[in-house]
Image (cartoon, rainbow, N blue to C red):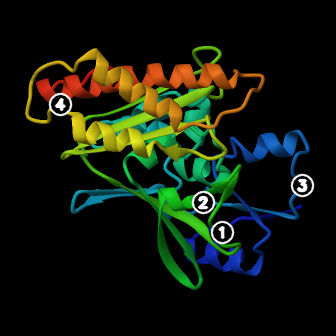
Amino acid sequence: MEFLRPTTLAEALALKAERPDAVPIAGGTDVMVELNFDHRRPDALLDLTTVPELTEWSTSDGTVRLGAGVPYSRVIAELGESVPALAMASRTVGSPQIRNRGTVGGNLGAASPAGDTHPVLLALDARVEAASVRGTRILRAEEFYVGVKRHALDPDELITAVHLPAHAGPQQFAKVGTRNAMVIAVCSFALCLRGGAVGAAIGSAAPTPRRARAAEEFLAAELPWTSTQALPDSLKRRFGELVAEATSPIDDVRGSAAYRKHALSVLARRTLTWAWDEHRTGERACA
């Protein structure tokens, strides 16, 4: 197995063009597990940890551009105010050691339906920046996931950044696992209330992460956006039902399909309560 170690983005893209079979590795929290269990044996690894352009983030015109190599620990420490749901999701990833190594770019590259950051990216209508020697293109997060652990990148492309709205309004993330830490999600859910619009997305309850479109449309139409009153239970319950209907889960060792549907309806009601309380009071809950 060859180990390719570029020191600039231009060099990384050139190597990926020359060796499209090379598997990118950043934190290695997914790739190394697959190698250790002999689930994958690529001819080459493309180490991106020494590419400084991937470890930067910036804000411009209300948008955060998050480099694909920024670790979860920095997302938590540096982006908790501007993209709180992404920081919430990052806190649920593995252990402190994994959060110091793992990245949102790596989560995207693995494209697992159980990836913790995927529902947030979908709910915030994030854009994925992909680059190659041919140039750079932007894909909506919805376009990125094309199957179980499959994404829309071309063989010569690398994920270079994710673009997310800064201060996009009340947002929440919640996850159910078989224990409190170091666990793959049984299911997860993200919600964003933004200027009269709603973003709602599920994880680990379908072949790919997906938005709950009918739930979004219902909530956008039914929320009393100018009110400071608490929401009626009937509205929250219907929202939860529509979120559950958006799923197509399976039975596996972590949970049954029926449990996932039920759990997501509960997560939807809870996150809606927290996000609406922030909307009407200006105070964030459960961040």
Q: Mark 3 points at which residue?
A: 41
Q: Distance between the residues labelled 3 and 1?
A: 21 Å
Mark 2 lies on residue: 50
Is 2 situated above or below 27?
Answer: below
Local packing at callout 3 (Cα closer than 10 Å; few below 14, some 14-19, many 20+) is: few
Helix, strand or loop at disc 1? loop
Q: How far apart are marks 1 and 4 (CA)?
A: 46 Å
User: In what element is the residue under mark 4?
Assistant: helix
| Label 2 secondary element | loop
Of label 1 and label 4, which has the lower sequence position? 1
Q: Do the residues labelled 1 and 4 touch (CB within 8 Å)?
A: no
| Residue at 53% over, 20% down | 263
Q: Can you tell which of label 3 and label 1 is closer to the viewer?
A: 3
Location of residue 20 in the rendering, given as x and y in whole percent from the top left corner: 75, 73
Residue 272 spot, x, y in % from top left? 32, 26
> Given the image, on which type of amino acid does mark 3 rest?
Arg
1 or 4: mark nearer the eye: 4
Query: Which mark sits nearer the N-terminus, 3 or 2?
Result: 3
Residue at the spot of label 4: 279
Q: Is mark 3 on a helix, strand or loop?
A: loop
Residue 226 in the image: above or below residue 4: above
Please state which amino acid type lies under the numbered disc 4: His
Q: Residue 231 carries which label?
A: none
Amino acid carrying mark 1 in the image: Pro
Residue under the image location 59 percent in, 83 percent down: 133
57 left or right, relative to 283: right
Labelled pair 1, 2 in contact (Cβ < 8 Å): yes
Does 172 sit above or below residue 254? below
Residue carrying label 1: 6
Circle 1: is it few (<14), some (14-19), or many (20+) Cα within 10 Å? some
Mark toward the start of the polypeptide (4 vs 3)? 3
